[in-house]
Image: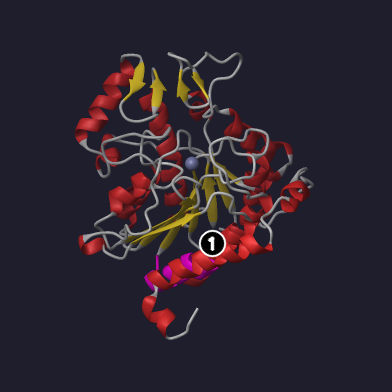
Amino acid sequence: MSETGFYTDERTFWHSTGVQALFLPIGDWVQPPTGSYGADTPDSKRRFLNLVQASGLSRDLYMGGPAEVTRDDLLRVHTADYVTRFKATSDAGGGDLGTLAPFSKGGFEIACVGAGLAMALVDDVLSGTVANGYALCRPGGHHCTADVPMGFCLLANVAIAIEAARARHGLSRVAVVDWDVHHGNGTQSIFYERADTLTISVHQDRCFPPGYNGLEDRGAGAGAGYNINIPLLAGSGHDAYVYAFDKIVLPALERFGPELIVVSSGLDASAVDPLARMLLHSDTYRDLTKTMMAAADRLCAGRLALVHEGGYAEAYLPFCGHRIMETLSGVTTEVVDPVLDFFKAQQPGERLVAFQRQLIDEMAAQFAPAAAARGER
Ligand code: ZN
């Protein structure tokens, strides 16, 4: 019961976006790459798994695989039309049914394996098979809406896992905390009018979807107040993230009282990610993981599931992911982040940190106006 789960499947590393330069389709003035196949290669994720094995940490983890994903599992979240088109296009050789979400032949089946990893993890956390855990999903999920794939995301993995858990475990209140550096627009759209799922996205302001900020989008109908966006300035570092979690994420979780916390764990807010401009390092991911574990302990008997989203720094992502797994499991290995001090030295200076905190305070006051008026934190 005390084990931490790590859910992976080799097939997810065989998902291919075809030939891209970073995320640019080849053609017009975009030169085909030599020896590189775009940002969303399997390498960052596979190297994460490989480091967990090389360090020996895997021996202390419950190494899990995917649950089978049925059409019914998909239809709790996606439209029948989208599932049918995705399968047909995949069978016919691949394509792109949305925005920057290309896939190759068999992409549908691989995406189902990825979603199945999230489903297995959430199911095992709820049944007590594992205490907590991480699903190394690929492709990611948080940009995919009910019927439009986007930004490397082909199925809404987190939403599929949550709805499967609702069907099997009668779960009602679930909180999703999305620390991927890009906005979790798909997850937001799926739960936007629902009060049973609190969705919180901490992201780089206006990064992706391009130009999106989201601060004013708080949910609608029954879901009004159950969607929170925390757009942080490009160049935010360790302090801004920790401060935003303390001032906004944690109070929102306390107010909501979830029965399960799911983290959409993109690792693309790192200091060297090619698709964003933040300054996090492995100690930040350790601290954010600790914060989520403490919240889960306090609010929902420790039920915490981390589901992988983006992250494109092949050389560095494994150190952030490995630190998360050490933190979740409480097991320390000999792995040392070789550039931690380098990135710590590059954090924003005092005046910029003070400005970033001021912006976060202003946002926090908007999310908890009553509490702020009483002078509470
Ligand atoms: Zn991302």
Query: Relative to 189, does residue 297 appear above or below in the rendering?
Result: below
Callout count: 1
Residue at the image position 48 percent from the left and 38 percent from the top? 137
- The image shows residue 96 at horizontal and vertical percentages of 34, 24
Crowding at label 1, few (<14), some or many (≥20) Cα neighbours within 10 Å?
many
Looking at the figure, which quarter contains the N terminus? bottom right
Q: Residue at x 66, y 42 (%)?
A: 58
The residue closer to the viewer here, 274 or 354, is 354
Of residues 340 and 173, which is closer to you in this image?
Answer: 340
**Residue assigned mark 1:** 292
Give the residue at x 26% y 61%.
223
Q: What residue is shown at x 50% (from left), y 38% (from top)?
A: 65
337 sits left or right of 148 in the view: right
- Horizontal relation, residue 294 to residue 286: left or right: left
Magenta stretch: dominant secondary structure: helix
Instruction: Indicate whether residue 368 is drawn in magenta.
Output: no
Q: Amino acid at mark 1?
A: Met
Q: Is residue 247 magenta?
A: yes
Q: Relative to the observer, which residue lies in front, 38 or 137? A: 38
Viewed as shown, does residue 85 lie left or right of 143? Answer: left
Instruction: Locate residue 372, reporting x and y percent.
Output: 43, 79
Residue 214 makes an appearance in the image: yes
Whether residue 309 is visible: no
Q: Nearer the viewer, residue 165 or 239?
A: 239
Residue range in magenta is 245-258
Quadrant of residue 370 in the image? bottom left
Locate residue 257, reporting x and y percent. 40, 70
Give the image's coloring scheme: secondary structure
The x, y position of residue 220, in whole percent, is 23, 59
Q: Is mark 1 within 8 Å of ligand 1?
A: no
Label 1: state its secondary structure: helix
Work out whether 156 lies above or below 103. Answer: below
